[in-house]
Every structure is written in structure tokens, then in C-alpha cells.
Image (cartoon, rainbow, N blue to C red):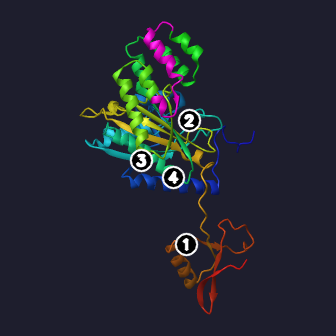
Amino acid sequence: MSAWVLPDHIADVLPSEARHIEELRRLLLDTARSYGFELVSPPLLEHIESLLTGTGKALDLQTFKLVDQLSGRMMGLRADTTPQVARIDAHLLNRKGVTRLCYCGPVLHTRPDRPHATREPLQLGAEIYGHAGLEADLEVLQLALDCLQSAQIGEVLVDLADARIVGALLEGLSLSENTRGDVYAALASKNRSLLVELVQNFPSEIQAGLLSLIDLFGDVSILDKALKILPQKPQIKLAIEQLKWLSDQLPHVTFQFDLADARGYAYYSGLRFAIYAKGASDAVIRGGRYDGVGAVFGHEIHRDRPAVGFSLDLKQWVGIVPALTLKAAIRAPWGTSSDLRNAITKLRQQGETVVCILPGHNSEIDEFQCDRELLEIAGQWVVKVIEK
């Protein structure tokens, strides 16, 4: 095997794709900034006990681990940035009010999280800490949709669910962690026969409620149906009413609801959403509410902070987002004269891309699609359109 073969699901990013990714990164971070989100940049590497604290423990099998040669302690390469941002909010910033944070950086996975995915996603996300109300949920969802719009992604479908519904049905039952996980998996995959087997010893009302969730999938009309057929538990009623309120605030968005889908149940504490776009085999944005995520990072005061946010993989977006038109460049000769150098410097300061043709390379491929050239005419350096 060649020494230059990269590991499975790891790839180089070549110039045109790298440019596309960087343009998207700037565009989406600027969109988050327009909402008042502050940029943070957590380290790629942390001590493993910090990296896998709290909700981070669910990432154990996805985390690459190594020994620090300086301290001898076990370290990990982050598989998700969200727990790190929660640590920053709770332990470093330690603010009392609302904090809006955004980030963008690589994460590493021991295995791809979906077919044909990279093990080195470029994760971008935004989080609101300190507000438990629906206003924060709506702002995060609106920001996610604005990011899609700014990237010129067309029609999208927003899938809404709420982790409290299944949680309320299972509340009070003495279940092993394996059984609980199997119930959630059966619901998410709509495996009725397996679910029947798993809940056969549950109270009849809970059995009926869990089995009915499998059919509670569709447009907003299923929310009224759910209120009628699910057990009359306050948390279930509240979750359904809040899902209805959120969808009402965005009347021009296409929503679907899947009340059985509680994936990430160990992580999400309320609203969960996934946004799908044409041409993408999986959701392009996932997010929701995860209250209490920063409690384990508390310092001198209790930091059980409400939190809601979303994340996405910019590398996934490249395949479905149209690239921005490349701004044509100016071709210039190479030379040492001060007049030429001053002319080139002035053009670059004006925002132009100026490509100097090194001696002997006039016939090489023009990667920057130069449509003008810098010429010396009557002792002056001027820009002229290249005649085709």
C-alpha cells in the first residue's frame, strides 16, 4: 500500500472545494453575528475526563484517545464541540444572563456517523445559554433557517419532535439502561413488533401511549390527534402545545412532526429539530434544547443553565450548496520595479486578486480566471480587459 494513501473516510480538501467551504464558513458566521452571537474557538485536544464529562460521555466511542507526552494523562480529540462550548459558558465566562455563542472548527470521529460521511467534519454551530423560554428556541430555529437561506439552499423541510413526550411516558418505570435504549431505538425506527415485545410488561396506559407514537407522524394535524390519544400528562400536553406554537410562528416553513423520534434522548431535554434539504441524504442541520448541559462544569455557583442550539457539517453542505461566483482576477507581470510593485500593492489594497506570472510560466492554467491584465502603457501601469 502506498504511504500516501489516507485513512478510510479521511480526505484532502482541494482548492475549489476549500474555497467553497471557507466562503460558507464566513457567510454563516456572519449570519450568526448578525443575531448577536459571539465567536469562540475551543481546543481540538482536551483531557479525556473534561471532554467526556456530562453529556460528552455519550461520545466516548466516537472519540480518539491518546496519551499526553508531557503529563502522562489520557487526552481526547473532540468528537463534538457543543460540550466544550457549554464548559466555556459555565466555567470561563460565568455570566448570569443570556449568552449567545457560535463556533466553527474540525471534529474527529472514530467511525463515520452516516454512510459516505467524513470522519473529520467541519462543525459549525450556535448556542443560546441562560433562557429557558420558547423565545430562545424560536431564535435558534430562525437562525438555522436564515443560514440555509443565506447559503441559497432552496426548499427545506423542518422535522420537529420533543424529548419530553417519550420521557414522560417512561417516567417512574424501573428500566435498565439497555431496555430504555432499546425502547427509544424501536420508536425511532418505527419497529412496532419489537416495541410490542419490549413494553409487554408495562402498564396498559403506557403501552398504548408508546405504541400510538409510531403513527403520530405527519403534518401539524397530528398534534391535535396526539392530545386526544396520548395519556393526559402535563409534560406531554406542554410539549405538544409548544411544538404547535413554534410552527405557528413560521407560517411559510414546511414542518413535519414525528413524536416517536427521541433520538439523542440522553442529550436533548425538550425541542429537537432536524432540517432536510433537496439533494442531501441526511439532515443538513440538527439541533434542539439541552437544558442543564453546563451543570457539571459549575464553579462557585450552580451552573444548571438552560441551553438551545444547533450544529451542522460544512463539508456536507458543499455537495448541495451552489458555489459563489469566483471573482475574476488581474494578471500581472513579475518584476522588481517600484512602480510595478506599487501598482500591484494598490490593487490588492482595493480588494483585487492580482496574480503575478513568474518567469517562464505564461502558458500555465489560469486557476483564478483572470479577465484583466496589468500593462505598462506610456510609462504608466494600467489595468486592461483581456480580449478573448
Q: Amino acid at mark 4?
A: Gln
Mark 1 or 2, nearer chain start: 2
Disc 1 and disc 2: Cα gap in Å?
39 Å
Q: Residue at x 56, y 35 (%)?
A: 109
Per the image, the residue denoted by label 1 is 352
Looking at numbered disc 1 in the image, what kind of residue is underneath it?
A: Glu
Amino acid residing under circle 3: Cys
The residue labelled by disc 3 is 102
Q: Nearer the viewer, residue 349 or 386?
A: 386
For the question of whether residue 99 can be seen, the reply is yes
Instruction: Look at label 2 and name its amino acid.
Output: His
The extreme top residue here reads 201
Q: Secondary structure at mark 3?
A: strand
Q: Residues within 10 Å of mark 2 (few under 14, many from 20)?
A: many
Sequence-wise, the earlier of marks 1 and 4 is 4
**Secondary structure beneath label 1:** loop
Percent across and percent down for residue 111 are: 60, 32
> Where residue 106 appears, x then y in whole percent?
52, 44
Q: Which residue is mark 4?
A: 149
Q: Earlier in the sequence, mark 4 or mark 3?
A: 3
* Badge 3 or badge 2: first in the primary sequence: 3
Pair 4/3: label in front: 4
- What segment carries the magenta color? 200-223
Query: What percent of the width, then of the height, locates residue 289?
Result: 40, 35
Looking at the image, can residue 88 be seen? no
**On the image, numbered disc 2 is attached to which residue?**
109
Q: Is residue 300 above or below residue 324?
A: above
Looking at marks 1 and 3 on the same chain, the residue that comes earlier in the sequence is marked by 3
At label 4, counting other C-alpha atoms closer than 10 Å, the crowd grade (few under 14, some 14-19, many 20 or more) is few
Residue 149's spot in the image, x, y percent?
51, 52
Q: Is residue 169 magenta?
A: no
